[in-house]
């Protein structure tokens, strides 16, 4: 087990009927005016917006709004929200949405106090010193952003999809009401599952090992697999939905990183290039394609763990080979409806070079194998078809 | 799954060579003078005291000391430490020790700002409003106190062993260096394991159920069982020691309580009477005796979970009965060297009535079955031999 520091100050409020409490929580913290940040209109259709508004009014909390945050969120929207937040001197950001909205909100919270372009935090030019307090109402469980200090945003000018991390952007409070996710389309459900499973796998297939944390990892992934299958048939099964939601939060709140060297994260780097080149590709879809390809490329270095994973997660018995486990994972991704090749995502062979170039901007990356341009190209080739 | 709120702001610094960093952390937080609280002389023998002192000196942090906190810590020592902390106007408490020292330190931290007797917090007369910042160097992993807001102290005048909880006494920072525990005697190791296992079981055998958290519970308990067996033979096996230590922390930092109604905790109430009547009884020893007796008493209400526990933790197969699982747990306790009856702990039959009276002061308690005087007596009778 490697040395580690765990510090996660976010308060997680979890369960049915918790969204209505947001106003009380804000009031208790002395917040008077918030910037409401959200995406398209779904929160107006499923009743979440109305619940939040009623709770804000009851607790006399003012708000201004910025909407239209899109999946694979862009920097220009972050800039717009920073401007609105400043012009209206808000005390806090209230993000209502999934990963895209919350990640954008983190950049807004940090950008509020920064004189330069907050993109600097993404390219390592600025180490965030201060941020507006961030409150979250999560309407789609997937990325774990509700309980960590990371955000991913695409610079729409340069096509770069980068992330930043800061202890200052951990949400003060995140509300997760599983019932608010009953109406999510099934692809958002299974891409969310793949995203969360990939977060756990980035740590699991690290060069380090803690049997305790690996066991917890396996439990989280098994829960995601089991509950995804139930929810595809019964989206309003509360027990399955609640276990799914909590599993996605625990997948990336620091727990699964305990005792590791911090994870490998190559597959995330490789995926960011995919959805930067084609912003219509969901992050989970990209991960379903590149993660198994990465596994194949490094399989000799992670064969023990692949076999352990196959036995403990997929219940494989007897002589298990690393290839068989990778195949099992891909099979499950296909079964739930996810693509497993770049071709299925609509890329042509000619895109491999473009993807390699974009990903290579961050190279070398990875801890299991430090990937350079040549490795990156080979992995995209494996992922192609 | 039940609704829950999780909020744990403690920073956990885990691993080899981390004790030496305490001075830096304190300095960074602006602490100038600490009250060093510790127990007997073990920290002077194993080098921990020296490391801490050197780090404090290097970072120019003043200290005053109160030592002599004993296992099953007493209120009179808490009073003494509050007096010393006040007379010397310390900025923080630095607890070096196991559960007894850290729990006492929590009472000192809270008592520092309270005009009345801090015992009021234990008997529900005072709701803690403020506390001195608490820093912890854990030298014995067992109770999980390094990452929660609970403390248990015995009032040496009244023989009452009570607990208090407050968000204000979560340690700011806890350092866990597994190598500092290499020299612990084996009984402290296995009583620690039993304590941590019991913490998890209080939630696991609750009336609520989350498959995700139950799976995590099983992983934690399996880790404790496996690593205890290794450490009894190889106390300096770092991987086993580190996994053991982390498992005890996760057993009671809120993770295992997610999605539950808050746990049953009857066995803890029943045990507190045992070690209040005879302070020489280790908390873990008392739990090894009363928990299986409680299980036997309520087995019809928890039979599904007992069977699940038997299969997933002990690997039992086929037709598993609840009694068989309880037997398996007792067998393991005996195997590692723990007593499993009140008689083995040195109590006579006549003590059952005294124990019942002490425990009954807190009755009714428990969520699986709400225990009253008659139930309590029957459980002690089951536990007797």
Image: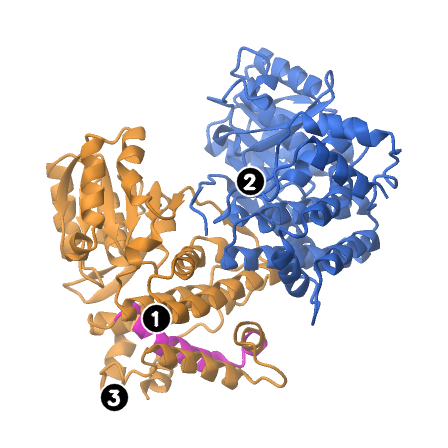
Chain colours: A orange, B blue
Point 50% across, 69% down: residue: A205
Pointer 1: residues within 10 angstroms few (<14), some, or many (20+)?
some
Residue nearest the viewer, comparing A229 with B189 = A229
Give the quadrant of the C terminus of chain B. top right
Asked which quadrant contains residue A354, the reply is bottom left
Calculate the distance from the C-alpha at mark 2 to the C-alpha at mark 3: 52 Å
Residue under numbered circle 1: A232
What's the magenta region? A282-306
When the figure is inspected, residue B73 is found, relative to residue A38, above or below; the finding is above
Calculate the distance from the C-alpha at mark 3 to the C-alpha at mark 1: 33 Å
Q: Is residue B110 magenta?
A: no
Task: Inspect this view and state whether residue A211 appears.
Answer: yes
Judge left or right: residue B211 versus residue A84: right
Task: Name the chain under label 3.
Answer: A
Pointer 2: residues within 10 angstroms few (<14), some, or many (20+)?
many
Task: Name the chain under label 1.
Answer: A
First-in-chain label (3 vs 1): 1
Q: Secondary structure at mark 1?
A: helix
Q: Secondary structure at mark 2?
A: helix
Residue under numbered circle 2: B147
Judge left or right: residue A169 versus residue B335: left
Point 54% across, 81% down: residue: A300
When the figure is inspected, residue A351 is found, relative to residue A312, above or below; the finding is below
Residue nearest the viewer, comparing B83 with B261 = B261
Eye-nearest disc, 2 or 3: 2
Residue under numbered circle 3: A349
Residue B112: give x, y in percent of width and height. Answer: 55, 17
Judge left or right: residue A58 versus residue B283: left
Calculate the distance from the C-alpha at mark 1 to the C-alpha at mark 2: 38 Å
Mark 1 and mark 2 on one chain: no
Residue A154: give x, y in percent of width and height. Answer: 22, 62
């Amino acid at each position: 087990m490697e040395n580690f520091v765990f510090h996660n100050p976010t308060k997680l409020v979890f369960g049915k009927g918790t969204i209505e409490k947001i106003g009380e929580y804000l009031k208790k913290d002395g917040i008077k005016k918030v910037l409401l940040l959200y995406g398209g209109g779904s929160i107006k259709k499923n009743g979440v917006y109305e619940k939040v508004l009623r709770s804000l009014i009851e607790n006399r909390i003012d708000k201004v709004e910025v909407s239209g945050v899109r999946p694979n969120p862009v920097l220009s929207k972050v800039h717009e929200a920073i401007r609105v937040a400043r012009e209206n001197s808000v005390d806090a950001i209230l993000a209502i949405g999934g990963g895209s909205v919350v990640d954008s909100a983190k950049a807004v919270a940090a950008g509020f106090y920064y004189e330069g372009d907050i993109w600097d935090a993404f390219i390592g030019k600025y180490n965030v010193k201060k941020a507006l307090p961030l409150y979250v109402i999560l309407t789609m469980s997937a990325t774990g952003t509700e309980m960590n200090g990371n955000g991913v945003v695409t610079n729409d000018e340069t096509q770069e999809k980068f992330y930043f991390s800061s202890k200052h952007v951990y949400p003060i409070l995140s509300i997760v009401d599983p019932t608010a996710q009953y109406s999510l389309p099934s692809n958002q459900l299974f891409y969310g599952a793949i995203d969360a499973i990939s977060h756990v796998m980035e740590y699991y297939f690290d060069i380090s090992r803690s049997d305790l944390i690996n066991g917890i990892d396996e439990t989280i992934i098994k829960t995601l697999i089991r509950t995804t299958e139930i929810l595809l048939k019964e989206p309003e099964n509360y027990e399955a939905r609640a276990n799914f939601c909590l599993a996605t939060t625990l997948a990336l709140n620091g727990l699964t990183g305990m005792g590791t060297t911090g994870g490998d994260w190559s597959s995330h780097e490789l995926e960011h290039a995919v959805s930067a080149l084609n912003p219509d590709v969901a992050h989970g879809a990209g991960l379903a394609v590149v993660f198994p390809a990465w596994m194949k490329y490094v399989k000799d270095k992670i064969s023990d763990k692949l076999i352990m994973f196959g036995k403990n997660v997929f219940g494989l018995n007897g002589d298990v080979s690393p290839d068989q486990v990778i195949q099992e994972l891909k099979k499950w991704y296909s079964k739930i409806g996810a693509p497993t090749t770049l071709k299925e995502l609509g890329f042509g062979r000619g895109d491999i070079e473009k993807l390699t170039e974009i990903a290579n901007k961050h190279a070398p990356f990875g801890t299991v194998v430090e990937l350079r341009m040549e490795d990156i190209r080979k992995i995209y080739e494996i992922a192609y078809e």
